[in-house]
Image (cartoon, helix red, strand yellow):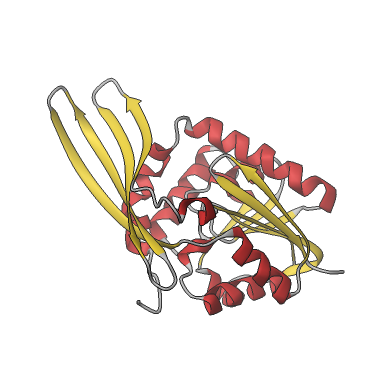
């Protein structure tokens, strides 16, 4: 297995089409902001580091609700899309954009933050145990005492037995063409067990369609595995709740 999992080729390629994996992109932005604010309210959160901002799904939504946001991502394509989304929503002044992966955050941002978040299933891109531990240690260092860490990821536990191969996406019916998304998963026993998401975008109409395929690798990570590392790093008050396809894990840095 490669020591590192370079995801930038994938995310740069799909940056402009990222919204196609959602039925309603605007509704998703609104929902994400309100959902995160519910977690933040009881922890006095004002400053947020979005450590895997992607196309701005969470960062732009939070800035629109009045939070001060630092948005980091290693993909130049996704950062450009996030900046565009921030401008479209009039919140570019409330967001500081930084090109960085998890492991180089300390060289690019200065804490402490009230909250550090990483959603969109970014943590499972880390394939090795030591990479996960290092990332969580960096999050810990960037948080203020009493600060909140929030992780949104797919829990692969329930998928390891059946190992599904085909997952449906969305169908968008436009005036000029129809766009269909779906995933084909390729599993590898490892260790650790990994899965390549082959993300397909099909465009066209009538009997003429064209297909694009974009592969990206994940570790088949489980919530239980992450909880163990969170405890070892020093986080307290771990909590896990299911939210649609992902689980939301929260933890507190001790005061």
Residue 157 placement, left or right of 40: left
Q: Residue 223 in the image: state x and y as whole percent.
A: 61, 59
Determine the residue positioned at 36% across, 45% down.
16
Quadrant showing the N terminus: bottom left
Determine the residue positioned at 56% across, 47% down.
246
Between 202 and 81, the one lying in front of the other is 202
Q: Quadrant of residue 224?
A: bottom right
Question: Is residue 252 positioned above or below 127 on the image?
Answer: above
Question: Is residue 115 positioned above or below 179 on the image?
Answer: below
Residue 101 placement, left or right of 243: left
Quadrant showing the C terminus: bottom right
Determine the residue positioned at 62% across, 70% down.
109
Q: Residue 29 in the image: state x and y as whole percent.
A: 56, 37
Determine the residue positioned at 71% across, 76% down.
232
Question: Is residue 73 positioned above or below 179 on the image?
Answer: below
Between 218 and 37, the one lying in front of the other is 218
Find the residue positioned furthest to the left: 207
């Amino acid at each position: 297995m490669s020591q590192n999992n370079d995801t930038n080729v994938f995310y740069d390629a799909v940056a402009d089409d990222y919204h196609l994996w959602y039925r309603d992109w605007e509704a998703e932005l609104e929902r994400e902001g309100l959902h995160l604010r519910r977690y933040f309210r009881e922890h006095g959160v004002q400053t947020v580091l979005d450590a895997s901002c992607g196309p701005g799904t969470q960062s732009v939504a939070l800035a629109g609700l009045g939070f001060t946001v630092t948005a980091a991502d290693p993909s130049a394509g996704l950062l450009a899309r996030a900046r565009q989304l921030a401008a479209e929503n009039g919140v570019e002044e409330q967001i500081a954009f930084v090109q960085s992966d998890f492991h180089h955050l300390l060289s690019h941002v200065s804490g402490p933050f009230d909250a550090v978040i990483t959603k969109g299933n970014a943590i499972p891109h880390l394939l090795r145990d030591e990479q996960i531990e290092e990332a969580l240690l960096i999050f810990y260092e960037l948080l203020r005492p009493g600060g909140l860490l929030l992780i949104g990821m797919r829990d692969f536990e329930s998928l390891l037995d059946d190992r599904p191969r085909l997952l449906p996406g969305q169908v968008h019916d436009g005036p000029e063409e129809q766009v269909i998304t779906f995933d084909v998963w390729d599993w590898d026993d490892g260790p650790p067990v990994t899965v390549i998401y082959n993300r397909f975008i099909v465009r066209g109409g009538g009997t003429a369609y064209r297909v694009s395929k974009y592969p990206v690798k994940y570790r088949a990570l489980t919530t239980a595995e992450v909880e163990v590392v969170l405890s070892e790093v020093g986080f307290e008050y771990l909590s896990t709740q299911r939210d649609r396809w992902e689980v939301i894990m929260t933890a507190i840095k001790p005061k």
